[in-house]
Image: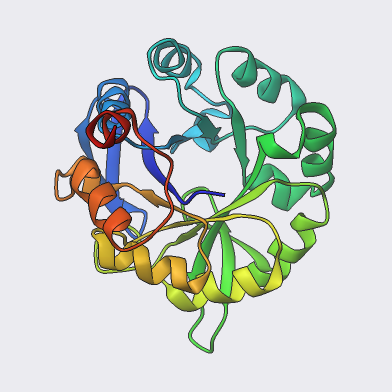
Amino acid sequence: MSFRLIARLDVKLSYLIKGIQMEGWRKVGDPATRAKKYCSDGVDEIIYIDAVASLYQRNNLYDLVRDVAAHAFIPMTVGGGIADMAAAKALMAVGADKLAINTAATARPIFLAELSDTFGSQAVVLNIEAKALPGGGWTVMTDNGRNHTGRDAIAWAREAAGLGIGEILVTSIDQDGSCRGMDLDLISQLSREVDIPIIASGGCANAAHVLSATKAGADAIAIGAALHLDKLSLRSLREELRTSGLEMRPFPEDIVNNG
């Protein structure tokens, strides 16, 4: 499987937002406009997370997903507040290709198996918000790092992998928004424990960060702050990674230029 570059967009109501360590959010753009730009710049997938879904007890991204799906023909993962099958079906109906599940899964793990049985394992992504513990290891948080679950992140990943999920999106809360690099120990431990693709999120801002994460075991990288704040060019990043020998999906411009 080719390595994937994924744009992660956290959304509050109609705004694209970004914070540091999942706190201090500020508005950084329009989520639909940004998604379309990233698609034209060569991103492989998009992840939308409704950052306030728990507050409103529903995912509010239906119109946004419908709009972007009509213009961006790449896989789109949607998460936030998906607590039952009705919400899952509604998001898939408007254009979501995959569903990222966090809070509902920690409360009722069998929900992951139900989703997998309904939509296929390729459509179910376990969303882990991992917070490093002072004594070592990581604990699972929900609601953008606000609520403790008491679960160990590595053990939770193993349990969920046995329920038919297709991927794990793991976000290091400690590195989130920092642009200083990723939690390589977290990625490495997860990759050793599960046999499904790992999307690593939190702290990526350049090609060196990506390559370090791939060596640790990441199958894809989800980038947020570095893209939204224009600290990183997707086109340049793709070229650097390709030059470094990383196998990636051909982008139309690459085919034209090399043809």
The single residue placed furthest to the left in the displayed view is: 230
From the viewer's perspective, is 27 left or right of 86? Answer: left
Position of residue 6 relative to residue 182, above or below, is above
For the point 37% across and 25% down, which residue is it?
13
Residue 111 appearing in the image: yes
Q: Is residue 106 left or right of residue 30?
A: right
Q: Nearer the viewer, residue 120 or 214?
A: 214
Q: Extreme front residue here?
A: 259
Q: Residue at x 22, y 33 (%)?
A: 257
Question: Residue 35, percent across and down?
Answer: 32, 27
The image's colour scheme reads rainbow
Q: Position of residue 14 (x, y in %)?
A: 33, 22
Nearest the eye: 187 or 111: 187
Q: Quadrant of the C terminus?
A: top left
Looking at the image, residue 215 lies above or below residue 83:
below
Relative image position of residue 48 (x, y in whole percent): 44, 33
Examine the rendered structure and indicate whether residue 192 appears above or below residue 35: below
Q: Quadrant of residue 122?
A: top right
Q: Is residue 225 visible?
A: no
* Residue 83 horizontal/vertical position (percent): 69, 33
Near-viewer residue (227 or 131): 227
At 39% from the left and 38% from the top, the residue drawn is 250
Q: Is residue 122 left or right of residue 37?
A: right
